[in-house]
Image (cartoon, coloured by chain):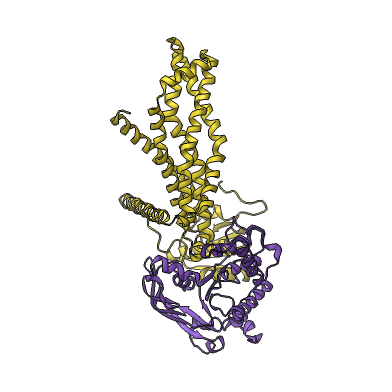
């Protein structure tokens, strides 16, 4: 679904990515982990065509992302959904209008029908009906994420990108969001790329984890396999009290 | 501020005795109490020669700042060839001293950012302005290409955003424009009346108010008010959206921010500003008329009779002809500065300020340019 080859990214004189390669397979949830400044969010932004890399090739759904003309890029965007850190809901629109915006933009359907489909997505994201008419400023952190997720899946995308979905959420809300992500994956057959630090998410949600560091992917594989990789940046996720607790709770993957 | 210590803190002291061989240290060697001692230390270090014993028996308390002062003192004395011995130091304080000494790099010892010389700064500013100018041209170019695309595919024009902006930027500004224009008319008429009365030329107040308002003052005043009111709002809105990631979200949904955010604002202002200027013209003249009646005994009928002769259509049109240019300046600068916001709230604030200042600057420059142009064309 996604093929990254030889990616190089630079901020000023500092190379964030150097010859980075990565693959994301159909139907999997790939988590991007790594220390701060390792370029996880930057990689995500380059894949969804928000920020151009210095060099390298990024193919999404068979298309070379950065060589596309505007019209084809727009068509490609319809097949992708993005959940930004903090949600990035449009402050002047209600939840229903937020979720309906992509639908209005990319289809010719009747207003009422669009509202119904939007309502459906909101319900799939686990929000109660009374949230539909609320403005983002009236929602709690967990609800904002869910609303943003509903907007991300509005067009039934094939690929979903999540940037730190559990950041800032209390453990209960974070756990619930993890379950929602898994539920949606099986329900809608989504492939996902998740940028996250959250150890519980890494164990619970990810099929494979790619650890970024030193400008490239240091290790990639299921979490349990990574425990044997003898690289310091990877071992950070397995040492220390927090890592052991997340590991030791013995998450069972359904 | 000399020697001021917090209440309840005993100032730190070090008293050399026995020809500088022993220093009796006392007091609170803490942040709140070491200021005076720190100043006197260089002098103290010069007292006597040979080994020094620092006696801490009477020191009440010590924190990291005090420990740092001690470490520095020891280092200075040792460097001056005087071995130092510390006696009666509490274990807790000794630990603090060890902790502080463990930090290898002293603050300020690292590579300082060297302040560039005047020439370098001038160069940097110049290049910075050039880059910003190029970026602005790129922005205008991008907008022009999106505009062309919109004209070719009218379905992609965002009418709702357009009309919403017309209401906010235009209609909602009527009261303030009206009031300020009216008052300006009053002021012009009053100022002129003093002179005109002396020559018995009262009726010419009509020419004064009419031509000044219609040709120069109303377009300029309305543009400046709108720049402050609407230009800043555009910048703040777009800047905040950029900060929260909403602009990125729009891009990923497939809606170009140019189409939804920028273009409707530009067009709304192109429609609203001329209309607001006409409104300003009317109310300014009305204000002048009221003042003319009050101080110059020029009746409304006389006023309006004269008005037709004094103010020609050409005058009105030269005034209004400037407004689309002003509107374009306000909207483009406002939106551009909004897009330049990055990082956090202070950036939005800074960009908003820049936007208003730049808009007003370019409006006045453009106005001057128009004056030259019109005088050349004899309008």
Relative to residue A155, is residue B374 depicted above or below? above
User: Which residue is drawn at the image coordinates 31% and 29% (left, top)?
Assistant: B375
**Quarter of the figure that contains the C terminus of chain B:** top left
Where is residue B276 drawn, in percent x and y? Answer: 50, 36
Count of all numbered marks drawn on residues in the image: 0
- Position of residue B20 in the picture relative to residue A69 (left or right): right
Residue A28 found in image quarter: bottom right
Q: Is residue A84 left or right of residue A121?
A: left
A73 left or right of B300 in image: left
| Viewer-closest of B21 and B139 | B139
Q: Nearer the viewer, residue B356 or A185?
A: A185
Q: At 45% across and 17% down in the image, what residue appears?
A: B306
The residue shown at (53%, 60%) is B246
For this orientation, the residue located farthest to the left is B376
The part of the image, by quadrant, that contains residue A51 is bottom left
Depth check: give the residue in front, B206 or B15. B206
As drawn, the chain in purple is A
Residue B223: percent from left, percent from top: 46, 37
Q: Residue B81 in the image: x percent, y percent?
A: 43, 66
Q: Colour of chain B?
A: yellow
Where residue A224 appears, x then y in whole percent? 56, 88
Q: A103 above or below B281?
A: below
| Residue B18 in view in this figure | no
Q: Is residue A68 visible?
A: yes
């Amino acid at each position: 679904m996604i093929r990254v080859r030889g990616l190089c990214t630079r901020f000023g004189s500092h190379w964030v990515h150097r010859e980075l390669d990565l693959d994301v397979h159909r139907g999997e949830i790939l988590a991007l982990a790594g220390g701060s400044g390792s370029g996880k969010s930057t990689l995500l932004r380059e894949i969804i065509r928000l920020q151009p890399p210095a060099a390298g090739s990024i193919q999404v759904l068979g298309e070379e992302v950065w060589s596309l003309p505007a019209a084809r890029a727009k068509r490609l965007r319809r097949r992708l959904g993005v959940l930004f850190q903090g949600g990035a809901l449009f402050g002047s629109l209600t939840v229903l209008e937020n979720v309906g915006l992509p639908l209005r933009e990319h289809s010719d359907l009747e207003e009422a029908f669009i509202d119904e489909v939007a309502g459906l997505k909101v319900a799939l994201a686990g929000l109660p009906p009374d949230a539909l008419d609320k403005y983002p400023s009236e929602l709690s952190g967990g609800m904002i994420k869910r609303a943003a997720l509903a907007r991300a899946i509005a067009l039934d995308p094939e690929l979903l990108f999540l940037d730190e979905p559990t950041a800032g959420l209390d453990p209960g809300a974070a756990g619930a969001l993890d379950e929602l992500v898994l539920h949606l994956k099986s329900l809608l057959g989504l492939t996902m790329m998740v940028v996250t630090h959250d150890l519980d998410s890494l164990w619970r949600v990810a099929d494979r984890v790619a650890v970024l560091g030193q400008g490239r992917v240091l290790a990639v594989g299921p979490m349990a396999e990574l425990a044997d990789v003898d690289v310091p940046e990877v071992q950070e996720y397995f040492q220390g009290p927090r890592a052991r607790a997340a590991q030791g709770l013995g998450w069972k993957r359904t | 501020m000399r020697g001021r210590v917090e209440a309840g803190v005993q100032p730190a002291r070090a008293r050399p005795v026995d020809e500088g061989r022993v220093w009796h240290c006392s007091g609170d060697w803490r942040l709140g109490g070491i200021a005076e001692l720190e100043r006197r230390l260089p002098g103290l270090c010069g007292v006597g020669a040979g080994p020094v014993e620092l006696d801490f028996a009477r020191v009440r308390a010590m924190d990291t700042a005090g420990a740092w002062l001690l470490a520095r003192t020891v280092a200075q004395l040792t460097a001056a060839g005087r071995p130092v011995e510390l006696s009666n130091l509490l274990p807790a304080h000794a630990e603090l001293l060890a902790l502080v000494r463990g930090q290898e790099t002293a603050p300020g010892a690292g590579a300082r950012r060297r302040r560039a010389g005047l020439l370098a700064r001038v160069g940097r500013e110049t290049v910075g302005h050039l880059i910003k100018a190029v970026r602005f041209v790129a922005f205008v170019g991008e907008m022009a290409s999106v505009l062309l695309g919109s004209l070719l595919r009218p379905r992609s024009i965002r009418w709702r955003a357009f009309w919403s902006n017309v209401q906010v930027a235009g209609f909602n500004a009527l009261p303030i424009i009206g009031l300020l224009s009216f008052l300006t008319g009053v002021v012009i008429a009053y100022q002129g009346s003093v002179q005109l009365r002396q020559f018995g030329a009262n009726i010419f107040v009509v020419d004064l108010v009419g031509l000044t308002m219609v040709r120069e003052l109303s377009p300029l005043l309305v543009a400046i008010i709108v720049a402050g009111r609407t230009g800043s709002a555009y910048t703040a809105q777009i800047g905040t959206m950029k900060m929260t990631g909403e602009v990125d979200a729009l891009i990923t949904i497939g809606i170009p921010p140019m189409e939804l955010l920028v273009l409707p604002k530009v067009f709304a202002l192109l429609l609203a500003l001329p209309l607001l200027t006409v409104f300003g013209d009317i109310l300014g003249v009305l204000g002048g008329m009221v003042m003319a009646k009050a101080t110059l005994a020029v009746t409304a009928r006389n006023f309006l009779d004269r008005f037709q002769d004094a103010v020609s259509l050409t005058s009105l049109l030269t005034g209004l002809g400037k407004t689309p240019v002003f509107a374009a300046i306000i909207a483009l600068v406002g939106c551009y500065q909004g897009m330049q916001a990055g990082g956090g709230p202070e950036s939005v604030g800074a960009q908003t300020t820049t936007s208003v200042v730049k808009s007003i600057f370019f409006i006045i420059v453009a106005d001057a340019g128009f004056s030259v142009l019109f005088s050349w064309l004899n309008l």
